[in-house]
Every structure is written in structure tokens, then in C-alpha cells.
Amino acid sequence: MVDVSIIIVSFNTKELTVECVRSVFRTVKKSSFEIIVVDNASEDNSVGELKRLKTKNLKLKIIENSGNFGFSKANNIGIKESQGRYVLFLNSDTLVYENTIDGMINFMDENSRAGASTCFVRLPDGKLDDASHRGFPTPWRAFSHFSGLARILRLKPFTGYNLSHLSLNKTHKIDALAGAFMLVRRVAGDDVGWWDEDYFWYGEDLDFCYRLKKNGWEIYFVPEFEILHYKGASGGHRNKKDST
């Protein structure tokens, strides 16, 4: 068993996926790991490029799906081939920074009730990807967020949608994080049955986190560590299901 299995779902993001994989190899120094790229029948020679990379990196595994199975099913396929104590779900349009994965694993080791955690997911403009720091949506939270009340009145009753009343400089519990960087304790994932394949793409991370919290697991935001997220670049065609 390795410390962490890193699962990356790929669909027509050849250059991004290769750079993401390379960033993992460059930055993980202390933890044992494997990388599992699950390709959803890309048409841009993603698999060919990954196979070339694999000749130099035996820790890389490639799973070739026969069609575009979406995010949830592809992740579940990767989980079945994984061996890690932890499973890190990582978007193909991300770059991992030095010590992020090692540091996040150390955090999880020190917090036994943490079922999942995320780091500071930074966008190219330097801001936090607020999808990685969320409260569970309710009608009131959605109204406060989309009406602008949360920006004007930065108080807890109005900021529940993105938990913007909480400091982004301190580690704290959150309701939900994003699948861009989602480190899950294997026993917690097993406890909730991993990803619900009724979700093809989008919304599945909220559902996953809801089930974790419902079963008593804690979810953390750990801003000490970071990744870069080219948000949206991994999903240009993700909503097109395979017709077969």
C-alpha cells in the first residue's frame, strides 16, 4: 500500500494533463504515491503522450475508457485500481506546488476524523477558487450570494454559500470542497461508497461531501498548501456523454 493514489480524469486535455502529472512527480518528495490517469476516450492523443511519459515513470498508470463516462464513473474506475491509504482526486487543469501533497497527507495523518481536505486552490488571477471553500447550498444562502448581500454584509448569516466570513489564512472546517483537489481518507470513501455515478459532471463533489458529513466525517480547508487551477480548462467537452 502506498500513502496516496492520485487519480486524474482526462478528456481532451493532453498538454494540461501531462503538465499536471509532471508537477506531481516534481513536487512529491516524502510520500509514496501512484498516479492513475483515467482517460475518457480523448481524441487528442492524450493517451499516446501519457504512454511516452510512462516509459520514464513506472508510478504512472493509464486506464483507457471506451467512451466519455463522466467524472464520477471515471473516478470510481480509478479507485478500483488504486492502493493508497488516501486517494487524491486532482483535476487535469491543475499544477501542484512544492510540499503540497506531502503536507496535506501529514495534515490528514494528524487529524483522524478528517474524511477529506483541500488546500488553497488558487486561480490564475491569484484569488481563491471559491468552489473549494463552500457551505452546503440552501435557498437563503443562494439568495444572499447571488443578490450581493454576502459581499455587502460579510457576516455569518449572509455568507454561508462560500463561507466568506471565515479567514482564508487559517485552517478550518468547511462543508464542501471541489473535486479540483480533494484528498480523501480511504476508509471514509469506503464508508460513503465513493462517487455517485448518477452525477455525470458537476455537483458530484457537493454530494460526496454531504454524505461524508452525514456520516460524521470532518472536511477541512488547509491554506498553508496550494495548487494552481486553470479553472474550466479540463471541462471544455465534459458534458457530452458518449452516445454508445
Image: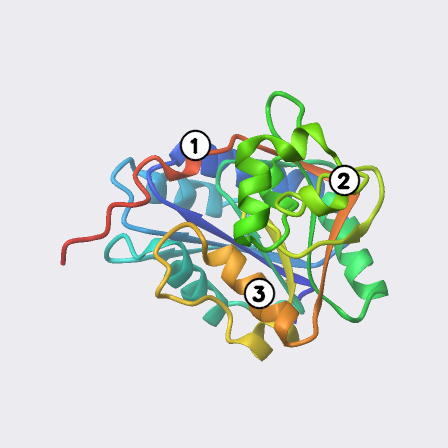
Amino acid on which the number 3 mark rests in the picture: Tyr
Judging from the image, what secondary structure is the residue with disc 2 in?
loop
Residue at horizontal 51 percent and vertical 44 percent from the top: 91
Q: Position of residue 235 (x, y in %)?
A: 38, 39
Q: Which mark is residue 155?
A: 2
Measured Cα–Cα span from mark 2 to mark 1 = 33 Å
Residue at horizontal 77 percent and vertical 61 percent from the top: 108
Residue 83 visible, this orientation:
no
Residue at horizontal 80 percent and vertical 71 percent from the top: 112
Q: Which residue is mark 1?
A: 233
Q: Position of residue 229 (x, y in %)?
A: 57, 34
The chosen color scheme is rainbow
- Rendered position, 149 above or below 181: above
Considering the image in quadrants, where does the C terminus appear? bottom left
Earlier residue among tags 2 and 3: 2
21 or 175: nearer the viewer: 175
Earlier residue among tags 1 and 3: 3
User: For the image shown, how many numbered marks are present on the structure?
Assistant: 3
182 or 5: nearer the viewer: 182
Amino acid on which the number 2 mark rests in the picture: Leu
49 or 102: nearer the viewer: 102
Considering the image in quadrants, where does the N terminus appear? bottom right
Q: Position of residue 215 (x, y in %)?
A: 64, 76
- Rendered position, 217 above or below 103: below
Measured Cα–Cα span from mark 1 to mark 3 = 26 Å
